[in-house]
Image (tube, grey):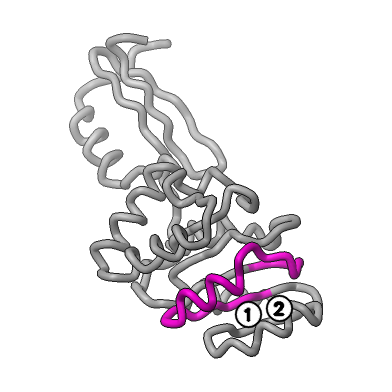
Amino acid sequence: MTGDLILHTGSVSGGTMRIYKNRTRLFGYLYSYSRENGYGREMLICTNSDQIESLESLAEALPEMHFHIAAVTEMSTKLLSMDRYPNVTLYPVARPAVFHKLYAMCDYYLDINYGSEIVSAVKEAFLHNLLILAFVKTQHNRTYTAPEHIFQDAGVMAAAIREAASTPAAMDRHLACQRQAALSEKESAYQDLFVSDAAEEPEAD
């Protein structure tokens, strides 16, 4: 609708629309983030499957990063054997409090497990400002995963993780890309709109 402003407000659950004359601006969503990224080197994987793409390769390629792997079920012998790596910690039969602690301490989420997604992991990772990275074959929720962070190759993913971990500014660039892909809007954008339109009434639709 040329010449009008289309405004979507609200949270991730939905929004409303208002139309103003003479301007065009598509607004995104105001997400309620639980924390800021801490620029650390802790990475989270939530899975009920022992089929995790390139896990050993990533653990070996990124010894400076720590992999936290949590499941709500018991873990298979195959997955439990990953504790041979000093940079891997396993959490079988994890309670909600454990997941809450892990989201609070980790700064990356690896969506690299096969099978179904558990505990709304990708969305929770997004709302906790974890940088989300996935493989094409394993991604569960593209709404919160930037296309630039979906990979075919473990080596390329490892390189992206190293780059993001190199400086806080690098991580901020990756997170900005992630938020843009999820249509995240800053609260100040809405505040500026309502201040500038205080004297202007919306036209009837």
Q: Answer left or right for 50 relative to 64.
A: right
Q: Quadrant of the N terminus?
A: top left
Q: Position of residue 178 (x, y in %)?
A: 41, 50
25 in the magenta segment: no
Asked if marks 1 and 2 touch (Cβ < 8 Å), the reply is yes
> Which residue lies at the image location 44% right of the left edge and 70% below the top edge?
107
Residue carrying label 2: 95
The 10 Å Cα crowd at callout 1, few under 14, some 14 to 19, many 20 or more, is few
Q: Position of residue 83 (x, y in %)?
A: 65, 87
**Amino acid type of the residue that numbered disc 2 sits on in the rendered structure:** Arg
Give the magenta part as a residue range.
46-70
66 in the magenta segment: yes
Q: Determine whether 90 is above or below 22 in the image.
A: below
Q: Secondary structure at mark 2?
A: loop
**Amino acid type of the residue that numbered disc 1 sits on in the rendered structure:** Val
Residue carrying label 1: 98
> Which residue lies at the image location 53% right of the left edge and 71% below the top edge?
58
